């Protein structure tokens, strides 16, 4: 059994990665404080801490979508949480009904073809780096 006090020894807020229990896909990311953590365990619905508003709210309170808690894990250093949920409804309901909040593709590797990517590993990135350019060829073939 996990010692829950280790989660909150050095921090007041933990990052949370949420995975759809049926598909295994990451559907969103958020934060929890002790209050959101306690509400999540008590209600079996995922609650988040809003960093900007400094408030705690259950996921989907306004839209009616629900994240039903299936499993919660802590990483080996107790620095983040991984939560498996049954997602009822959409994650980004107001933005065309997406099932994940990860909708902006940055890189996809094509097997057998050349793909395009930003070479962050091969280009020195400084404050003047142009992140908008998409013409860096992938020479990792």
Image (spheres, rainbow, N blue to C red):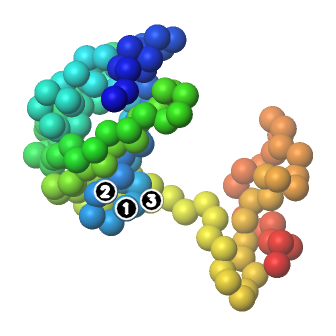
User: What residue do we see at 20% from left, 30% from top?
Assistant: 41
133 vs 33, nearest the viewer: 33
4 vs 102, nearest the viewer: 4
Asked if 62 appears above or below 38 in the picture, the reply is below
Q: Distance between the residues labelled 2 and 1?
A: 5 Å
On the rendered image, what quadrant is the C terminus found in?
Answer: bottom right
Find residue 113 and report its horizontal and vertical position in percent.
Answer: 73, 86
Query: Label 1 belongs to which residue?
Result: 24
Query: Label 3 belongs to which residue?
Result: 103
Q: Which of marks 3 and 2 is in front?
A: 2
2 and 1 marks in contact (CB < 8 Å): yes
Q: Which quadrant of the structure image shows residue 25?
A: bottom left
Asked if 36 appears above or below 45 in the picture, the reply is above
3 and 2 marks in contact (CB < 8 Å): no
Q: Badge 3: few (under 14), some or many (20 or more) residues near its Cα, within 10 Å?
A: few
Query: First in sequence: mark 3 or mark 1?
Result: 1
Asked if 18 appears above or below 46 in the picture, the reply is below
Find residue 100 and report its horizontal and vertical position in percent.
Answer: 36, 57
Query: Label 2 belongs to which residue?
Result: 20
- Residue 50: tell me if it is visible: no
User: What residue do we see at 67% from left, 83% from top?
Assistant: 111
In what element is the residue under mark 2? strand
């Amino acid at each position: 059994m996990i010692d829950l006090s280790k989660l909150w020894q050095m921090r007041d807020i933990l990052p949370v990665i949420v995975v759809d229990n049926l598909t295994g896909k990451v559907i969103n990311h958020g934060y929890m404080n002790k209050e959101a953590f306690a509400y999540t365990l008590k209600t079996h619905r995922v609650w988040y801490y809003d960093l900007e508003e400094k408030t705690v709210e259950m996921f989907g309170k306004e839209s009616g979508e629900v994240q039903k808690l299936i499993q919660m894990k802590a990483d080996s250093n107790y620095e983040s949480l991984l939560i498996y949920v049954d997602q009822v409804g959409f994650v980004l309901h107001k933005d065309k009904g997406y099932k994940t909040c990860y909708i902006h593709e940055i890189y996809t590797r094509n097997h057998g073809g050349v793909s395009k990517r930003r070479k962050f590993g091969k280009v020195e990135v400084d404050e003047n780096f142009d992140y908008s350019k998409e013409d860096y060829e992938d020479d990792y073939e």
